[in-house]
Amino acid sequence: MSNGVALDIQGLSKQFKGKRGLRVEALCGLTMQVPQGEVFGFLGPNGAGKSTTIKCLMGLIAPTAGSATIIGETIGSVESRMKVGFLPENPAFYDYLSAEEYLQFVGRTFRMPDDLLARRVEESLRLLELSDARKRPIRSYSKGMVQRVGLAQTMIHDPELYILDEPMSGLDPIGRALVKDIILDLKKRGKTVFFSTHITDDVEKVCDRVGVIVKGRLMALDRVETIMRSGIEGYVVQTKAGIGNHTALASFGLIRSSEVFREYSVPAGRFNEFTALVSHHALEITLIETKRKDLEAFFLEIVENVAR
Ligand SMILES: Nc1ncnc2c1ncn2[C@@H]1O[C@H](COP(=O)(O)OP(=O)(O)OP(=O)(O)O)[C@@H](O)[C@H]1O
Ligand SMILES: [Mg+2]
């Protein structure tokens, strides 16, 4: 039973034997869950342990300790594999095949009936904008097209969960936007998406929650919305010049002033005081801009703290 949990990871750890017998702690006791229907961003710098985690989940490498289930099925089992659409870090294909042939091949490994497979191949090619190149061998594709074939093959069996290792990597801004749209569309259809990235912008746009992994350890896990809201540092507020008594606002930092407006820097904790003064002194607010610490600043702070 999955009880609405798509991914349940308990104390997952992986040690590699590095050079000169030195052990590399690639992943240390990762514990987390992803509920069904969520888009989860697994954010971490290079070498953080993202791909190691994903390879463990897909049964490609054995964890040193810990366990995990995918929609209630133990990782490494055939049943768990059937429920996932998986995009590896550097997808390599039989590149003498065309995208269409490759997708048919993947569908057959999932034992899909021919008519359903034909429909799903059509749909995946269309979604990933590969219809025109469908008959050409993959070796003639650009890097971005190859990445899109990788994404198309994750969808072929219409899985419940998508595990994507850096799905936006190697794509131009148009390709990135396409992938983001596809992820949001999967969410609308009730699917669960777990994807890794080191780019905070990708997370900000599409994820419900984000986990930050650094040096094999989960350093933060929260709703993206909560992080963004807690990052509000203050406001830039513009008032109309020429009406009301502006001297009442003298204790706020004046950023700019012209014949038309005055612009103040208002700390988050003094916003109510500011608006109370505005209404009391017959002033008029014309614009409010939020000054926030974005997800990137949040991420960099964590990474820098770990490095210290
Ligand atoms: N087969 C291996 N043998 C030895 N060390 C390994 C092996 N695979 C990974 N590592 C080490 O484990 C750590 C985590 O690597 P991993 O590939 O999981 O990072 P990542 O977060 O996916 O990074 P990137 O953003 O660069 O893809 C790194 O220090 C890496 O060198
Ligand atoms: Mg990786």
Image (tube, rainbow, N blue to C red):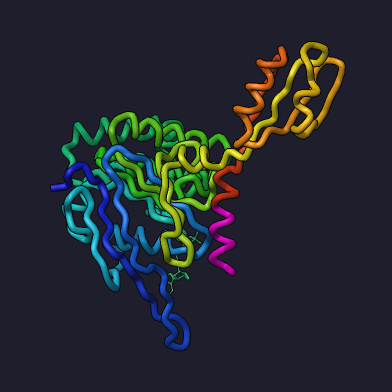
94 or 284, nearer to the observer: 284
71, above or below 285, in the image: below
Please say whether residue 142 is visible from this viewpoint. no
Quarter containing the C terminus: bottom right
242 shown above or below 97:
above
Quarter where residue 301 is shown = bottom right
- Is 200 situated left or right of 51 in this image? right
Expressed as whole percent of the image width and height from the top left, the position of residue 219 reads 45, 59
Residue furthest to the right: 259
Instruction: Please determine whether, in this image, residue 249 is positioned above or below residue 223.
Output: above
Residue 216 in percent (x, y) is at: 43, 66
Give me the residue at 25% from left, 33% from top: 118
| Residue 241 is at least partly visible in this image | yes
Say left or right for 291 vs 81: right
**Looking at the image, which is closer to me, 223 or 80?**
223
Per the picture, the main secondary structure of the magenta-coloured stretch is: helix
Instruction: Please give the range of residues in magenta.
Output: 299-308
Nearer to me, 252 or 48: 252
Q: Is residue 13 left or right of residue 288?
A: left
Residue 272 against residue 286 in the figure, above or below = below
Q: Is residue 182 magenta?
A: no
Indicate the quadrant where residue 38 lies.
top left
Q: Residue at x 29, y 73 (%)?
A: 64
Report x, y in % for residue 282. Answer: 71, 12
- Where residue 232 appears, as percent x and y from the top left, is 58, 38
Q: Residue at x 26, y 41 (%)?
A: 36
Ligand 1 location (quadrant): bottom left
